[in-house]
Image (cartoon, rainbow, N blue to C red):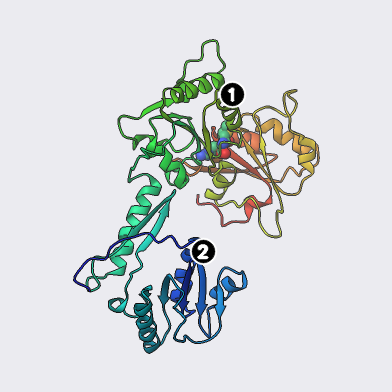
Amino acid sequence: MAEHPAYPVGLRLSGRRVVVLGGGQVAQRRLPALIAAGADIVLVSPEATPSVEAMADAGEITWARRPYQDGDLAEAWYALIATSDPETNSAASAEAERHRVWCVRSDDADQATAWTPATGHSEGVTVAVLTTDARGRDPRHTAAIRDAVVEGLRDGTLVAPHHRTRTPGVALVGGGPGDPDLITVRGRRLLAEADVVIADRLGPRDLLAELPPHVEVIDAAKIPYGRYMAQEAINNALIEHAKQGKSVVRLKGGDPYVFGRGMEEVQALAEAGIACTVVPGISSSISVPGAAGIPVTHRGVAHEFTVVSGHVAPDDERSLVDWPSLAKLTGTLVILMGVDKIGKIAETLVAHGKSPDTPVALVQEGTTAAQRRVDATLATVAETVRTEDVKPPAVIVIGAVVQVGPAPAA
Ligand SMILES: C[S@@+](CC[C@H](N)C(=O)[O-])C[C@H]1O[C@@H](n2cnc3c(N)ncnc32)[C@H](O)[C@@H]1O
């Protein structure tokens, strides 16, 4: 039997009986995929691990709390034989053979009529890797091949364009705060499949250098906007390229919906009848403080954090922020786009009740090689920004959480 390679096949187990013998670690590892496949699973075992028991409690499997007995496999389409007793396993696989039920065995692959491949998933694709014969089985090697393929598909280093299913349109991808490793797996894959990428100044710009030469990369800041507003010009560029049938990625810094004007682009695309998908990103509002050792919440210190735009001063009539109320909150204030106006902001917070000694940290170009943290208080922050020459992009954190971590490296 071992002389021939195994024949790979995908079993469609939905609603079909699968019998699992043994409720130990092997069952625990294999059951989730069988449940996901919709199989009608009967577990036969006097005992089970707590996780397997939880699956039975949740009604995901039916558990017969007893040892295996002849006849258990009669109605099965597929069996997983994994008791700790080799004799029971042999008796069960003999029964499986008799009833022509494909079975895997955890203790003796040679005696099994089926082998479980190392499997992984990426966006609707199942990757299954099988060693060709029982004697040459090397589960670690197989798993490593599976990992390499799945990782490659996920992060876009293994490019497999969806020729049949790929629908032209626009993906608004949140690129994260700047470190190229902090984009999502889905974002990276869409980037790898794009024909056109329209990118912001902030975000993981290093990823653009990795794109194949045929990909057109457009710097959003350089789109000529003549009689249009910049945002309108970006919307038009997205629409034009998508209408040409291209896959367009709009790569944005952080998360598209956190001060990212993402919804304006979604609305413009919807009006133009263009399909659009939005991929969330790691927002700088949480990740940049974190990268500088500042948690936005901390037990016993801050039970809330508020993310605010500081792009207009508190006394500016365009401001939608209720700064006097924010001054009364005890939690953390995270201010984006606030470097220019931090003097006025700090003044307003103090005028409405915040202590001038409230700690403040400014984290410039967080998660990049140029990351820099500067500490101050509400009383000193305006002067500190000047003397330390803090420049955008920076996230400003105000509150006691600034001081809960280990002291920042000098
Ligand atoms: C227009 S907002 C976009 C925010 C973005 N959508 C997000 O979720 O992070 C730009 C502001 O985000 C902050 N920012 C973004 N990336 C940053 C980074 N790597 N380091 C520091 N601040 C950053 C700065 O306050 C900057 O002025």
Residue at the (51%, 41%) spot, across then down: 177
Which residue position is annotated with label 2?
Answer: 15
Marks 2/1: CA–CA distance: 43 Å
In this rendering, is residue 376 above or below 240?
below
Residue 246 visible in image: yes
Looking at numbered disc 1 in the image, what kind of residue is underneath it?
Glu
**Numbered label attached to residue 171:** none
Q: Residues within 10 Å of mark 2 (few under 14, many from 20)?
A: few
Q: Residues within 10 Å of mark 1 (few under 14, many from 20)?
A: few
Taking depth in this image into account, of 272 and 156 the one nearest to the observer is: 272
Q: Quadrant location of residue 382?
A: top right
- Image side of residue 276 versus residue 152, left or right: right
Q: Quadrant location of residue 133?
A: bottom left
Taking depth in this image into account, of 113 and 341 the one nearest to the observer is: 113
**Numbered label attached to residue 271:** 1
- Image side of residue 343 versus residue 369, left or right: right
Looking at numbered disc 2 in the image, what kind of residue is underneath it?
Gly
- Image side of residue 285 versus residue 16, left or right: right
Residue at the (30%, 59%) spot, across then down: 145
Taking depth in this image into account, of 209 and 98 the one nearest to the observer is: 98
- Image coordinates of residue 314 in percent, x first then y, are 73, 29
Q: Residue furthest top?
A: 227
Dot 2 or dot 1, earlier in sequence: 2
Q: Secondary structure at mark 1?
A: helix
In this rendering, is residue 172 above or below 38?
above
Q: Secondary structure at mark 2?
A: loop
Residue 387 visible in image: no
Dividing the image into four equal quarters, which quarter contains ligand 1? Answer: top right
- Image coordinates of residue 213 in percent, x first then y, are 30, 31
- Image coordinates of residue 32 in percent, x first then y, are 49, 66
- Judged by depth in the image, the label closer to the viewer, 2 or 1, is 2
